Image (cartoon, coloured by chain):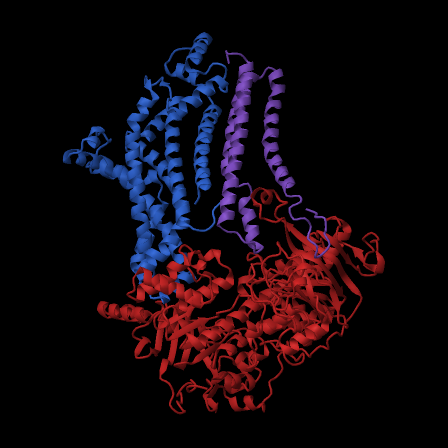
Amino acid sequence: MAGAAAGPPSPLRSGPPAPPPVLEVDDLSVRFDTDDGVVRALDGVSLTIRSGETLGILGESGSGKTTLAFAILSLLPENAVVSGTVRFGETTVAGPEISGRAALRLPRRARRVLTAKLADIRWKGISMVFQGSMNAFNPVYTIERQIAEAFLLHTTLNRTEIHERVLETIRRAGLDPVVLRSYPHELSGGMKQRAVIAMALALRPRLVIADEPTTGLDVVIQARLIGELRELKRTALDSMIVISHDIGVVAQLADRVAVMYAGQILESGSVLEIYKSAANPYTKALIDSYPSLEGARHEVRGIPGAPPDPIAPSPGCPFAPRCGYAEAICRTTPPPSVEVEPGHWSACHFAREVRSGRRAASPAPEALAPVPPGRVAGPPILRGERLTKYFHLRGTFAGSLFGGAAAVPLVRAVDGIDIDLRAGEIFAVVGESGSGKTTLGKTLLRLLTPSGGTLAYRFPEASSPESPRIGAAGGGLTAVGDLRAGSRTFRAFRKDTQLIFQDPYDSLDPKMTVFDIVREPLLAYRMAADPDRVVTRVTEALAAVSLAPPQNFLDRYPHELSGGERQRVAAARALVLKPRILVADEPVSMLDVSLRIGFLNLLEKLRREFGMTILYVTHDIASARYLADRILVMYLGVGVESGPSQRILEEPLHPYTKALLQAVPVPTADWNPGRIEIVGEIGNAVDVPAGCRFARRCPYRQPKCAADPPPRQSSGWDHWYLCHFSPEELRSIRGSGEFSGSPASARPGP
Amino acid sequence: MTAPGPDAGHLPGADRDRDVPLARALGTLVAVPVAVLVLLLALPVPFALAGVLDYTSVVPTILFMGGIVVLFVGAWWDFGARKYVATLLAHHLPFGETDLVLVHRRQFHLMLLYFALGSLYLATAFGIAALGGPSG
Amino acid sequence: MNAYFFARKIGQIVSLILLMVVVLYAIFRLMPGNPAELFLISSRTRASTVELKALEAQLGLAGGKWNFHGFLIYFEDMLTFNFGYDYYYQATVWQLLSLALPYTLLLLGTAAVLSYVGGIPLGIVATWFRGKRTEGGIVTSALVLNAVPYFILAIVLYLYFVSYLKIAPVRAEFPWTDITSPSLANFATVVTDMALPLVTLVVIGAAAHLLTMRASMVSVLGEDFITTARAKGVPERSIMFRHAARNAMIPVSTRMALEFALLASGAIITEIIFSWPGIGHLIFQAILDLDYPLAEGALFLISLIVILAYGMLDFIHAWLDPRIQL
């Protein structure tokens, strides 16, 4: 562990000859004057980063981590009021006299000197990889022009020299120089992110700030990028600050971690110290919010409540209202910073007790006891056989007109999926974006009409006194795949099945109250005749999603609710008809980490209390593992592996499943993204290979993989996978790390 | 939009039915204006028989105007290209410079096609006017 | 931008012009009243059926409003700028228009250029001073001016400078030779004659451009790539003009066409109020008189100007935005 920890108020700089500090943040507070009041974005933050060191900053949205980055780059807006200082080497880049509002009052000449000084430090001294780099490039200029701009501003090189340096920069980032002539919209997400990193490293700055460098990318690309960043850390980078909400990402890149909450550093120390023996309740709760892959299906708690209002801070510890350990003192007195171990600081009244585990937290209301896996196995309730959903591009009007000779007719979004939902189970469909998982979810609910295959649903036994006798095919299942929309059977099916969308911000009409939103399905199914019953059902639905007390929410509008509450309202809307099957399409990907688990636990509660069957569609195999009884892994429209989640996790057989599991960054030392040998990106579901869909990216592929479709092989216990290799062969790959045959050379996909 | 469900993992002939939908799409694009033309020719007939209007004088004017509208549609309608490209991008399909040029070329050709159809309207207009004799 | 795209844009402009010709014809034929009758009434003669028929034949109206022969003559005349003989002024329409067109082009062209050149940079400047009193002043006055209709400002200026102060001419009377043979004295005449109509158009037009540009700039400045540019150490001026302005111009350039059309309509009204001897003035008279040939010719010419300006702005838009355009 290099360098001393940063801990307020008096960082103890211990240890033998430490390298000189690159950046020192000393008791930095930042307030913003807004129309709503004073927002306290940062509150007494102190940090030191030494040469050769990487600091991770862990925090959720609203924790002030981005404000900190902006303060370091002296990019604070003009309504900021700063106290404390940030020093980069010998230069003060932020301070009460020179930052934010105060900078406006400087004499003209002093301001010009300051601007020149700061302009010199930017990018040459400190550069930044921005969050959501989808928009980090100016859309109207080529990549080359934007990277060259950095050289133009900060060096005296001529045009040809700059061109050479830009080429070198882009090659170092592992990109094809063709990229340089592209406009940003022409690049894929992964390529753009690499180009952004390349630009940040172009001038070889002393400090790079990476703000959520991998957020929004698919897990395999994320793992690859983390690997590349770690490689750059050894070769091209001096010191770095990694900002993320994901403890896995931070842990894999950083040497030390500072945990931020409500503008304060609540804990800092080495990565392993913090992960293994956190001394702050917030850190503990945050770590517990991640369903981890390792270990048994242990209980995972969310953090109840919402982040504090930055405008009206409490006098005591900012985390106290959500803290399971909180005592009276926490609400009145700010906690002192305690050094629990050399270099490990925690701002908590009970830091030592929390660390040693002598104090136990009162259980969060949403925490649930672990569920034994495979507990429920009712009869099949929804069955898809050889289910396909193709989108025609050529077949459509425009497709036939504008598809060139090279274009192909269909997108095989779902291509021959066999799926069996059993009553009362939670079934997860896992895949990267582009795998067809969302299309599968919609096709199963007949929101999309399947192009082929059969879809059958088991209506409840005594269901239909009012509906005509629904012709029961074999096994009590009724074919719903080609029912006419609007037929009575179809309406009965539609009523029994509901969907929760990904984005809680888009899916709720901002002009409707919560009551109106939740009541809507009742109106649609003409069940709103009796106003009292409507109110009862809406209230019940809100109570079912733990919005308590429900009466408080009826008259509120979506914008008055937090993200987690909105997603609960969306769930209540789906529940008000008392459906038997619920499809949740990435329901938590837009939520803050500490709120995610709460929503997943809610799904579990719904299953438990109402016997609901839930299809959970996600890109996050760890959360699928946490929530689901069974998992189906999808790749380019086909299921490549399926089985009980426990078994998939313990013994993944398909190379793609293995890669997905390996790609999840975990805060342990032996995680190695370099082990992920699959190459390229997922591509598209159009020009699919004749043989195995995964063959182009598979590190173990043999000639027959590309030529013949792989057979479905069973390895018992309801576990099957789609591959040419037998379970024994695949296990031997895992054992030796290399297949006995000659591994195919790495070739990027199309 | 029901595709013959091919066996999973077995590719149907990707180009087997390539030209059929193109021909059909072009057919639709031609058929609609032609149908409108026929309609414009037929609708005034009862009025002409009733003596309300002079068929050989008024109908050509309407046809001529209709022809200009067809030209306009051909030049300004994108023929669904916007939505098509958006769909391509949504499905992670490659769409490069050559594809863009192809779309532009096709759009240009379709514009010419509609210019030809508009000319058909104009020709019909002159034909009917000629039937009415030089007095107009 | 490739040749096919270019060709299609040209096709769009041509088809738009043709459609406009047709729509003008239809609009005028759908208006109530028979021009021949009106002509005879206004000449205070009690028309007999024979006289009416003779006049209709003379005016090319024989065979009803919608006869093809008349339409063809109209169509051909429009495309050859032969707008026929005007039976009110006893001159060919083109003679009248060609006298008026230079005045309109002078006023409209100067107003368009000045309002773009003034409004867009002012929009950038207003963004530059965002949050300061300067911005508040600029934006508030632009909001007020933008809300004022052209004719109100024109009337106010007219009443104050012409009727009250009497320092501006009642009507613009400078001969076109003042422009073709420039001298200091001629120039002074032109400026005094043009000042009020020009100010009316430029002030309101520029206010609109300013507000559009500022709104667009503010949203662009919130984008991530602007923060990236700041972090790169790009000076504030380059951020404004090089990084933000070009992106902000993309939505503005689509609106510019619409605003040019508004400006053209404003020019018509302004010409009427200040008796500017341009096409707007002619249109006003012609519509009051149901003077088909002149009104059609004048409207055609104004529309043509607007369409050509639109086409040019479309190419500017395509050049500004490298993203896919269809």
Give the chain ID for the blue colour: C
Percent of width and height locating residue C120: 33, 49
Q: Which x, y percent locates residue C196?
A: 25, 38
Q: Position of residue A132 (x, y in %)?
A: 48, 65
Answer with left or right where residue A506 lies relative to residue C142. Answer: right
The C terminus of chain A appears in which quarter of the rendering?
A: bottom right
Closer-to-camera residue (C269/C302): C302
The vertical placement of A587 against C191, above or below, is below
Residue at x-position 37% and y-position 46%: C147
Where is residue C109 shown, x and y percent of the image? 30, 38
Query: Color of chain B here?
Result: purple
Residue at the image position 51 percent from the left and 88 percent from the top: A351
Decide if residue B13 is on the left or right side of residue C62: right
Q: Which chain is red?
A: A
For this orientation, the residue located farthest to the front is A742
Q: Is residue C186 above or below residue A603?
A: above
- In the image shown, does C2 or C121 lie closer to the viewer? C2
